[in-house]
């Protein structure tokens, strides 16, 4: 049978852990064909980002148009967009109904503190793209930036729920606030709670916190897994829950890997179960 197809509009990670590299591996793990519109080139490795080169919005749009004119896309993931003009261009396509099952991962800053968005990006997300997101997947830092809050304001689940409702008020149908940095925000939890806020209310998706330094690209992978699940026909709650399970398994699989001196990638392809080394 012809596979289902997903489109990722995102940046490239030269270290292979996050960005479109993680998205494509995630799509493949879900048996979904991946198509790409590259929005930025980053020089990065497991230790952090050292340089960013944004692709002109016109070229990003041309890539998307090339894909949509020839291939049926069943779901779309928007990750690092780098420039406000690119956000606006993607938002225009979404407003025309051309980006089905749009999952928006509002990448604003790297985990190492490197800015991944030009000035004006936060407002562009609010005005041009979030209103058309079927699922919005900010981490705590990104949610704080989008809502003009300090991340320490989200020090308990009730505050995270308020943030989710505030982001839904901007137009997103479902919001998943990723709790991977929950402990850093001052909260106390031994797990890894993600908060899902949608038409059916507020739901906590808790999970085991995997002890590993290999967690690079987990946010990208969660959003692309949600998109892949939507592409294959899952409803939104199922797509989100299954994506969290997928990322947790990938974290466990790569827990002992030694790829780089910093935060290495996760095991998207379940290689830990089928090792290709002696």
Image (spheres, grey):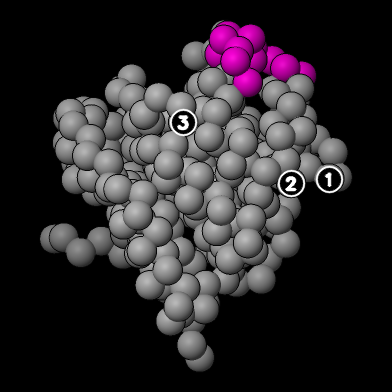
Instruction: Give whichever of discs 3 and 2 has the lower sequence position.
Output: 3
Residue 16 at x, y percent in the picture: 24, 48
Q: Identify the image quadrant of the C terminus.
A: bottom left
Is 80 or 125 nearer to us in this picture? 125
Position of 19 with respect to 101 (left or right) is left
* Callout 3 crowding tier (Cα within 10 Å): few <14, some 14–19, many ≥20: many
* Residue located beneath label 1 in the image: 199
Is 232 or 125 nearer to us in this picture? 125
The dot on residue 173 is 2
* Residue under the point 57% across and 62% down: 99
- The correct choice, above or below, for 68 with respect to 108 in the image is below
Q: Is residue 151 magenta?
A: yes
Residue 184 at x, y percent in the picture: 49, 14
* Residue under the point 35% across and 54% down: 58
* Residue located beneath label 3 in the image: 121
Q: Nearer the viewer, mark 3 or mark 2?
A: 3
* Callout 1 crowding tier (Cα within 10 Å): few <14, some 14–19, many ≥20: few
Residue 62 at x, y percent in the picture: 36, 64
Instruction: Give whichever of discs 2 and 1 has the lower sequence position.
Output: 2
Asked if the residues shown at circle 2 and circle 1 are in contact, with their CB atoms under 8 angstroms apart, the answer is: yes
């Amino acid at each position: 049978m012809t596979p289902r197809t997903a489109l990722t509009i995102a940046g490239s990670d030269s270290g292979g852990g996050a960005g479109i590299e993680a998205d494509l591996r995630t799509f493949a793990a879900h048996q979904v064909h991946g198509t790409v519109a590259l929005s930025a080139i980053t020089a990065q490795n497991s230790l952090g980002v050292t340089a960013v080169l944004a692709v002109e919005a016109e070229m990003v749009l041309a890539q998307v148009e090339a894909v949509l004119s020839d291939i049926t896309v069943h779901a779309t993931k928007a990750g690092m967009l780098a420039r406000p003009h690119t956000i606006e261009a993607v938002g225009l396509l979404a407003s025309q109904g051309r980006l089905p099952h749009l999952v928006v991962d509002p990448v604003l800053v790297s985990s190492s503190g490197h800015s991944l968005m030009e000035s004006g990006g936060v407002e562009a997300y609010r005005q041009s793209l979030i209103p058309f997101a079927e699922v919005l997947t900010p981490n705590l830092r990104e949610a704080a930036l989008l809502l003009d809050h300090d991340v320490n304001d989200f020090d308990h689940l009730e505050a995270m729920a308020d943030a989710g409702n505030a982001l839904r008020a901007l137009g997103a149908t479902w919001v998943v606030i990723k709790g991977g940095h929950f402990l850093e925000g001052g909260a106390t939890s031994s797990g890894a709670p993600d908060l899902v806020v949608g038409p059916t209310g507020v739901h906590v998706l808790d999970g085991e916190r995997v002890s590993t330094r290999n967690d690079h690209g987990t946010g990208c992978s969660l959003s692309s897994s949600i998109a892949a699940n939507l592409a294959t026909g899952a409803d939104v709650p199922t797509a989100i829950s299954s994506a969290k399970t997928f990322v947790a398994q990938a974290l466990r699989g790569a827990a002992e890997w030694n790829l780089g001196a910093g935060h290495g990638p996760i095991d998207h392809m379940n290689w830990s179960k089928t090792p290709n080394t002696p």
